[in-house]
Amino acid sequence: MTADTTLVRSEVRAFTWDIKGLSFSRENKPIFDADVTTTRTGAALKLFTKEGLAGEYVKGGNARAIAAATKPILGTDGLERERISSDLRLYHVKDDPGARAFVDIALWDLAGKVAGLSIGKMIGGYKKRLPVYPASIDGAASGFMSKIEEFADWAEMCYDHGVRAFKIHPHPWPDVASHVKVVEEVGKRVGDRMDLMMDSYCHYRSLADAVRVGKACDAYDYFWYEDPYSDGGVTPFGHKKLKEFIKTPLLMGEKITSWQERMAMVLAGATDFVRGDAPIDGITGTLKLAHACESIGVDIEYHGQGPAHRHLMSATRNTNYYEFGWTHPDVPTFEPPIYADDYYDGFPGAVGKDGCVPVPTGPGLGVTYDWDYVEKNTTWQVVHEL
């Protein structure tokens, strides 16, 4: 007998978690001090069917916008992800792609539970373990990674943990010369044994500065150069022009808010790799982007960690590395402690000796959330039901 997958109830919570040892300067530079704490806010969603099965997703997000996105889908079939994704984008939640994506991922979790399969298996996943690259914390105001040579120190420590790729986040250091120096220092230390990436986070205000850093990447054969311009990473002409001066492949798309715009950057010749981002496009949109890129021979690289990206990577031929978005030796993870099983997204604790992380195998997202923790730290909640 077919289960009734009509959506009848949504529960949304905002919750907080603390990151010990971290604060930020007025210029938004990280400060590392054992006596300080930063509090962050996440969102948690449960979407219930008529028969009581729930699709779940928990991550950073705007809980109020997510709650608004659940209202128009109640009374509809929760397995109709394609229609729901399109309707939310076109009619109901036009201005908040993160809220739409949050709902979409929870619906994929529901579909996997209905089918008794992981999301990875539902979309044809075959990879069991995923090679990792840690991305450094941003250039710090004080503490470790406030000095150029410490980025290279961290890259060497990461190498000792088994990974064979590393990404630099020098932003928000204002002096572009320091960005060139950190590219060179890391390249000298580990460039002959690790794939290296440089991510300026759209920092450079001129073509000249972007070229200066790109030339440094060229000298050490960097794997990619990511989001150079302060245009927000959205101008095809500028990035195509930059590619005329440097040989290091560009990776663009993090700051663009739809998979269609990301693909347009590819087709304009403005990037060599493209960012995929399930927390922005959902699994539905990100899977479309992956297949579109595959059809023209372009690789997609997923932005940040999480079970949704592990499942997508497991089924994507044209991708290379799983990203740990921020890493620092004194802070094991910047993610909330939301799992009641052995799933973990901290570095290096989540990484095996082979430099890889596993793909969850349980139904849906394949993770068990710690709802006691979420409820204990809830700051706001709302329930919508038919």
Image: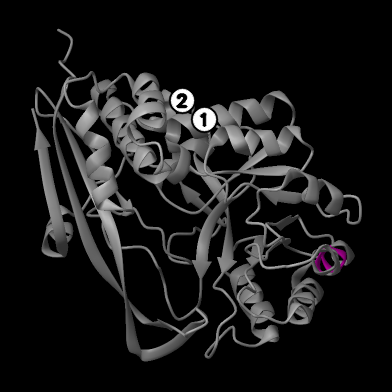
Can you see residue 271?
no
Question: Above or below — where is 141 with respect to 329?
Answer: below
- Give the residue drawn at x 39%, y 39%: 101
Does 324 appear in magenta? Answer: no
- The residue at which mark 2 appears reads as 123
Element type where label 1 sits in the image? helix
* Residue 39 x/y as whole percent: 30, 74
Q: Give the range drawn in magenta.
A: 213-217
Question: Above or below — where is 272 with respect to 153?
Answer: above
Q: Quadrant of the C terminus?
A: top left
Is 239 situated left or right of 39 in this image?
right
Does 216 appear in magenta? Answer: yes
* Residue 231 x/y as whole percent: 67, 57
- Give the residue drawn at x 30%, y 34%: 109
Is 320 situated left or right of 41 in this image?
right
Circles 1, 2 touching at the beta carbon (< 8 Å):
yes
Can you see residue 75?
yes
* Residue 357 x/y as whole percent: 48, 51
Question: Above or below — where is 165 with respect to 93?
Answer: below
- Amino acid type of the residue that numbered disc 1 sits on in the rendered structure: Leu
Is 21 situated left or right of 212 in this image?
left
The dot on residue 130 is none
